[in-house]
Image: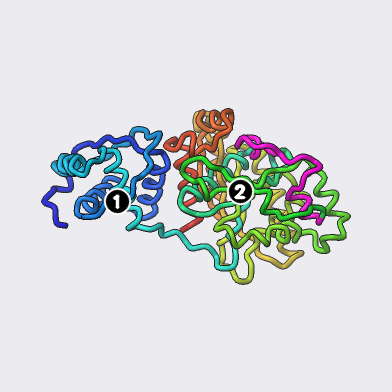
Amino acid sequence: MTVPYAPDDREKVVAKLPASLRQELKVRAAELGVDIKDAVTEGVQAWRSGDTEYPIVDTTGGSSFSTYLPTGLYGEFKDDCKERGLPFNQGIAQAIRLWLGAHPSPRRPARPNGARRIIFGNQKGGVGKTATSSGVAQALAEGGNRVLLIDFDPQGHLTKQLGYQLFDIEEPSLAKHMLGEAKGDLRELLVPIEESGFAGRLFLLPACKDAFLLDAKLATSRFVRVKETALEKAMEPLEKEFDYIVVDCPPSLGYSMDTALYYCRTREDEEPETSGVFVPVLAEDSSADAYDMLYDQIQDLTADMEVEITMLGFIVNMYDSRKGYIATSSLDSWKAIGDPPVIGIMPERKEQREAVRLKQPLLSYAPDCEQSEIMRTIARRITS
């Protein structure tokens, strides 16, 4: 449909839309390099030109959304909504959904034989492994991927922060499946994370209280002949059900970390940099010392097992330039490494702490905050 609207002559449009739809529009527009106002304009034009009734979009719990439509189109669209007996909010939601349907995500498709495996690791605790692994997993699911998030840290911070319970010592768990001590299907342990934006696509495998014993038990286990393969063997039945498996690793240099590193190696049928390790760090010296130990562990494992493990990048967490020379010079040092690159600089903000306190996913609690946007940027780097 040809429309006589000047693209630069626009007026503000305000509607109330559910967070999940706003997030999906924002992510898709970013993936395609399209301005949101142009995406909405195209959707409105397609909606107006259609002569069919479109499915009703659930707009329950909508909050303020604003964009700009060409002057004149806004008024005509409101008149069309009235003629079709639809509230304006429903009309704009249908138009956005129409545009999304016509513009699928260009993300890299899932591997035909299994999920891409992304681990977040650093020997030092408190560097943000849990926050970034959780946030990136949420962003991947928000973008339409089916994602499994694994709490592989015995402390179980990820499980607790999302509002779930750790498995008890007597219950089946990932650790027991790795050791051949569990009955039943590992699939039965998965917990769906139902918040808007990624409902039906994001699942959690909670931590277990006996995981502190995993290293010692792996060392003496006869069930796993090659210790480093324990996590992969346990996860193999689930891999084809997911696009991505994201692992929040423990601050450890033991067998459990070896199993996670081996799990994210580049497999024979896999393109380079498809799976690998993200290293969350802080802009200070102790993170650098911990990274050196992790780097040595990776080098030893690749030599011993004759495998390739890709370091996908650093994520500098809780960065605040107001801390002065220590913070800024440390950030410069991380950037100077070059390979792996710094792919995210995460400021310290109250939204992350609030989400943890309320036991809610960050991208559901504060979808428009700066930290959420950086999580989406990292997710786009993974899927591109």
Considering the image in quadrants, where does the N terminus appear? bottom left
Q: What amino acid is found at the position of numbered circle 1 in the picture?
A: Tyr
- Front residue of 149/196: it is 196
268 with respect to 378 (left or right): right
Q: Residue at x 51, y 41 (%)?
A: 345
Q: What amino acid is found at the position of numbered circle 2 in the picture?
A: Leu
Q: Which secondary structure lies at badge 2?
A: strand
Q: In this view, does 66 lie above or below 266?
A: above
The range drawn in magenta is 156-180
Q: Residue 351: x, y in percent?
A: 50, 31
Is residue 159 highlighted in magenta?
Answer: yes
Res 244 quadrant in image:
bottom right
Check disc 2: other Cα within 10 Å, few if <14, some if 14-19, many if 20+. many
Q: Which secondary structure lies at badge 1?
A: loop
Q: Residue at x 36, y 47 (%)?
A: 25
Dot 2 corresponds to which residue? 149
Colour approach in the figure: rainbow
Q: Residue 320: x, y in percent?
A: 51, 32
Q: How far apart are marks 1 and 2 (CA)?
A: 35 Å
- Front residue of 88/259: it is 88
Check disc 1: other Cα within 10 Å, few if <14, some if 14-19, many if 20+. few
Q: Earlier in the sequence, mark 1 or mark 2?
A: 1
Is residue 171 highlighted in magenta?
Answer: yes
Residue 9: in sight, yes or no? no
Residue 54's label in the rendered image is 1
